[in-house]
Image (cartoon, rainbow, N blue to C red):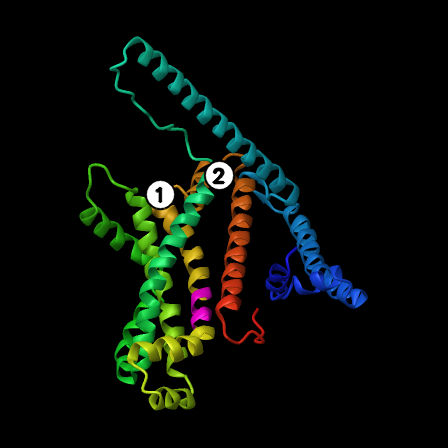
Amino acid sequence: MSIALTQTLSKISWLEPMIKAAQGENRSQNLSIIAKAIGIPLAGILVFLMIWHAAASSINTSLGKFPGPADVLIQSKTLISEHITEREKAAAFYQRQDERNARRLIQNPDYIVKIRNYTGKPTYVDQIGTSLITVLSGFLIASLIAIPLGIVIGLSADLYSAFNPVIQIFKPVSPLAWLPLVTMVVSAVYVSDDPLVAKSFVTSMITVMLCCLWPTVINTAVGVASISQDLKNVSQVLRLSWLTHVRKIVLPAAIPMMFTGLRLSLSIAWMVLIAAEMLAQNPGLGKFVWDEFQNGSSNSLGRIMVAVITIGLIGFALDRMMLLLQRMVSWDKSATLR
């Protein structure tokens, strides 16, 4: 491992004791830190699994017993197996299509090759991918709107007073309230004989964007407004232009609050997405949960629990990614970020 890579990885708090232990630096102390960092979360997960197993065995529903950890593990394996089977069917379909087109070209060199897409149903893994693309698209658009808006509002007390009531009015609006309006607007505006993406995707993305916009706007504005007077005086003494002032003074000082807003927005976006996909019928995790609920088979509860755990794990991973990004761009490397 190169020295530069080692130094980069050592900046990640949970990797630092591992790297030091591997290098022989205070090995016993670092191993103790590693054991504590890993052992305590594992103990918490173990206690949760025990409580879940005990509670599930005593709950009976119209579809049978509530699924425990073992049932969820079985269903997760089944879903992965179904994904592999569907991909094999798709590969076989395209192979047959290529062979058929090759035979027709041999018989008729002027034959116009026709390529058809495989129309099999999306698998659970495909639906996870669709949900991730949808939520990241909505979050990215929201961030591109919220960060500049928050900076402009934070730099002016009058603008902050003017926009704050509007923000506070729209901030608590549920996605269930936005969705019918967004659906009608998308249906009226997004009209195409050959659409680039499905209307359900656009509807879900815009709904996510409208719901996750506000935490980033508020936190960015507060972060910008709370910049110390000393930094403002430095900017005035150096006679920095407005753009340079924002780039050199405002953004570095507001990054902690800005990323707090971004992390809140991303978590809200992920929660909102599931409800939006249920109603918009965008083929993601939300639609998967709704379809299984409507299906009502003996395996439905187990599959829904797989989706619940998947949603939680992905949400946790997205938050950790934002935290890692914050550590990379933050000027204060000694700050404790959790």
Q: Earlier in the sequence, mark 2 or mark 1?
A: 2
Q: Position of residue 122 (x, y in %)?
A: 43, 35
Residue identified by numbered label 1: 281
**Marks 2 and 1, how far apart in space?**
15 Å
Residue 272 counted in the magenta span: no
Q: Position of residue 235 (x, y in %)?
A: 36, 86
Q: Look at 27% across and 73% down and name the residue there.
A: 166
Quick check: can you spot residue 164? no
Q: Look at 42% across and 51% down and name the residue there.
A: 274
Q: Is 255 displayed left or right of 174 in the figure?
A: right
Q: Which residues are magenta?
A: 258-263
Q: Position of residue 15 (x, y in %)?
A: 65, 61
- Vertical comparison of 204 with 246: above or below: above
SS for dot 1: loop
Taken as a whole, is the magenta stretch helix, strand or loop?
A: helix
Q: Position of residue 264 (x, y in %)?
A: 45, 66
Instruction: Quadrant for residue 176, please give it.
Output: bottom left
**Label 1 neighbour load within 10 Å: few <14, some 14-19, many 20+:** some
* Quarter containing the N terminus: bottom right
Which of the two residues, 114 or 186, is positioned nearer the viewer here? Answer: 114
Q: Name, please, the residue furthest toward the top.
A: 107
Residue identified by numbered label 2: 124
Q: Look at 58% across and 39% down and name the residue there.
A: 76
Q: Look at 66% across and 45% down and name the residue there.
A: 57
Query: What's the amino acid at mark 2?
Result: Tyr
Which of the two residues, 277 or 216, is positioned nearer the viewer here? Answer: 216
